[in-house]
Amino acid sequence: MTRTTSAIEQASGSEVERLRDQHESIILNQILQRLSKKDVPEQERVQYYMRHKWRLNHKPNSLRNSLKAIELFLTFYTSLGKCRLEEIVRDDLEAFVENEQDRGTKITSARTRLMYLLGFLRFLIEEDVIAETLLRRKIRLKLPDLLPRAMNPGDVQKLLSVIGHIRDRALILVLLRTGMRIGELLALKVNDLDIRERKIHLFEGEKNSLGRVVYLSDDALFALRRWLSKRDHKKGALFYGRGRDRLVYSSARHLFVKYLKKAGLENRGYTVHSLRHTFASELLNAGMRLECLQQLLGHHNIEMTRRYARLTDKTREEEYFRAMAIIEQGGIHGQG
């Protein structure tokens, strides 16, 4: 119990209100001091918003939770290559929600963070910083028991068959064959590659700050080598866009959707994250142990990896018919 809290309990009437205001003012200053130490863009606007919430008598926990949600979003936002709030588009919000859920954030936590983030964005709309159209449609969260949407093999082949652009083919194949998160891929530098050993070093994971290694299949390696021979060697990022030092999420998502439409797959419900889910389900179908897949995906908790086990329909099908063949041939002798 703090000295200020103890004093509040011993006082009464107007004195209580004065001490409570003083206590909450101290908490606000602590929150703003913490914010000043963070490397997030638009700090002045965030500080102004936090003071606005305090003037509206929002409780200290509300201030802390709001700041946490805004920090997470702005950190993710800068990873997209953006720093000005005026540049926010709906794709950025949906990408943030997808990223939070892909990191394993519980549905209740993701919903709460989105609620606080939307409060900040509505404030920016009132301040004429961003357009009202940004929040015109509701942003939906996937339920935790919803199966990841993996692509079936035929659709994978259709998708790959329409990608002729050297950079785009390398990008899609690396995602599909390594299981990397899109944010991890877009943050890669050329020095992170080990072409000789067919490895990519991820020195810090998006979720748990632990590094890991992913490996390159033959087709991904071939596509990557073609891109390396054509790319601008002055660029530090492995994948970059026109006029940018690195490709941002919205651009990567746009090109993925473009190729889905070209392949006639736009109504299948696939997202960029489907490539990661496809990687996981195909490896499990091929017999990879769950513990190995966990390391490749960078999951801190194996329960996150276990979701993909429910996708292995082909494995279950083969096991069923193998067992049933034994039964039908009289290989099982038991009493009914």
Image: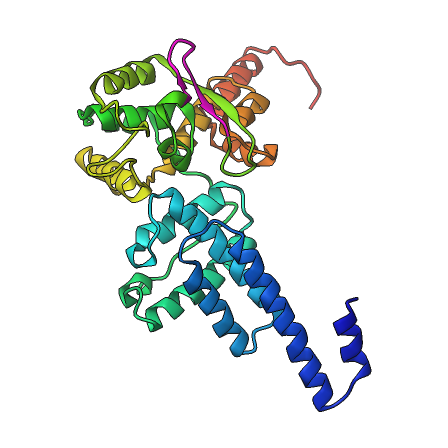
Q: Is residue 207 magenta?
A: no
- Near-viewer residue (263 or 195): 195
For this orientation, the residue located farthest to the bottom is 13
Asked if residue 308 is positioned above or below residue 48 in the image, the reply reads above
- Near-viewer residue (6 or 283): 6
In the figure, is residue 146 to the left or right of 150? Answer: right
**Which quarter of the picture shows residue 44?**
bottom left
Q: Position of residue 187 (x, y in %)?
A: 38, 33
Is residue 50 shown to the viewer in this render? yes
- Near-viewer residue (183 or 146): 183
Q: Position of residue 153 (x, y in %)?
A: 33, 25
In the figure, is residue 216 to the left or right of 293? Answer: left
Q: Is residue 194 magenta?
A: yes
Q: Residue at 47% x, 57% y: name it.
A: 70
In the figure, is residue 58 to the left or right of 91? Answer: right
Q: Position of residue 236 (x, y in %)?
A: 32, 28
For this orientation, the residue located farthest to the right is 10
Q: Residue at 36% x, 28% y: name it.
A: 175
Q: Residue at 72% x, 87% y: name it.
A: 15
Is residue 156 shown to the viewer in this render? no
Q: How many marks?
A: 0
**Which quarter of the picture shows residue 335?**
top right
Find the magenta span and give its range: 192-203
Asked if residue 255 is positioned above or below residue 193 in the image, the reply reads below
Q: Residue at 39% x, 70% y: name it.
A: 123
Q: Position of residue 162 (x, y in %)?
A: 18, 27
Quadrant of the frame with the N terminus: bottom right
Quadrant of the frame with the C terminus: top right
Colour scheme of the picture? rainbow
